[in-house]
Amino acid sequence: MPFLIMITFISGTICYFMVRLHPGLEHYLFFVLCLYASVTVVESLMMAIASIVPNFLMGIIIGAGIQGIFMLVSGYFRLPNDIPKPVWRYPMSYISFHFWALQ
């Protein structure tokens, strides 16, 4: 956890001030906390996958596949209202933590 906090604050600080997002301590702290929550969820998901899959390479492949699907339905590439509704928008985009981090 201390390593994740350090990575989050260093990369979040660099990105926040390089892009010149909203000034103010509250906005900066909210950005860093959202980034920290996303990193923590990704680490937890990958640890859960690693505990299920017996092979290291297979764990990386499955984890990258799940992350890729979550990114596809979250709004990185298309707006959430443009995603087809039956499967991809309703169950998948609401399960995806990327969707909530982008909101």
Image: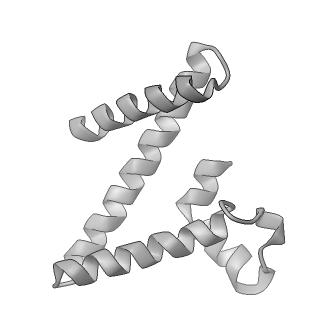
- x then y, percent, for residue 72: 62, 71
Q: Residue at x 16, y 85 (%)?
A: 54
- x then y, percent, for residue 66: 45, 75
Residue at the extreme right of the image, as rendered: 81
**Camera-nearest residue between 89 and 21:** 21
The colour style of the image is one colour
Q: Is 23 above or below relative to 85?
A: above
Q: Quadrant of residue 53?
A: bottom left
What is the tally of numbered marks visible in this picture? 0
Visible residue check, residue 1: no
- x then y, percent, for residue 6: 29, 32
Q: Residue at x 32, y 37 (%)?
A: 7
Visible residue check, residue 33: yes
Q: Is 59 above or below relative to 44?
A: below
- x then y, percent, for residue 96: 56, 66
Q: Residue at x 37, y 50 (%)?
A: 40
63 vs 101, left or right, is: left
Where is the N terminus found, in terms of image quarters? top left
61 vs 89, left or right, is: left
78 vs 69, left or right, is: right
Q: Residue at x 41, y 55 (%)?
A: 41
